[in-house]
Amino acid sequence: EWDSLLAYDDSPFLEHDWLRCLEDSGSVSGTNGWYPFHLIVREVEKEDDESSSSSSPSHPSPSNGVLPSSEPGRLLGVVPMYAKTHSMGEFVFDQSWAEAAYYQLGIEYYPKLLAAIPFTPATGKRIITHPDVDRESLLRTCAGVMEKIA
């Protein structure tokens, strides 16, 4: 279901099977500092209000974790994310940011939330959206959820 959102020119590293292989093999796991924390957005029907006879419109509903395809609601968007306890295995060199945050400001830099593909320098989008959904609206929904999580 996740892969149905991908366009023909999206990176193959965004495919669910690729990410699942990384997780199933233990290459990406909590024991090595990569905690899978994928953001899934599904369409959910609002329950009818007793005072209203018309049905309410659908709205995006974010949830954390990879949901099985038996979950209700059409899949609207996915953000492959990981909670990280270090910066190893990334192609972003932010160790100086981590040191500055901790030693100069007394702020814990880790854990951090990373929307990326593990061990992969491939560029491209990381927020996958259904082609029939207003992408800008869905991006705002995802950003709001990420702010609350972080």
Image (cartoon, grey):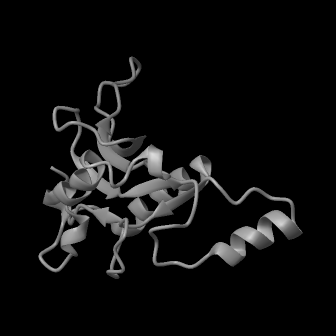
In terms of depth relative to the viewer, which is nearer, 47 or 148?
A: 148
In terms of depth relative to the viewer, which is nearer, 98 or 4?
A: 98
Q: In the visual, does 68 lie left or right of 79?
A: left
Residue 72 in the image, given as x and y percentages of width and height: 22, 33
Q: Is residue 6 above or below residue 76?
A: below
Residue 108 sits in which quadrant? bottom right
Q: Is residue 126 above or below residue 122?
A: above
Q: In the visual, does 141 lie left or right of 71?
A: right
Residue at screen point 31% across, 37% down? 44
Q: In the visual, does 6 lie left or right of 63?
A: left
Name the residue furthest top: 50
Residue 116 sits in which quadrant? bottom left
In terms of depth relative to the viewer, which is nearer, 91 or 149?
A: 91
Residue 103 in the image, given as x and y percentages of width and height: 85, 67
In terms of depth relative to the viewer, which is nearer, 116 or 6?
A: 116
Residue at screen point 80% across, 63% down? 102
Residue 122 in the image, given as x and y percentages of width and height: 32, 80
Residue at screen point 86% across, 60% down? 106
Count of marks overlaid on the render: 0
Residue 115 in the image, given as x and y percentages of width and height: 45, 63
Residue at screen point 33% across, 55% down? 27
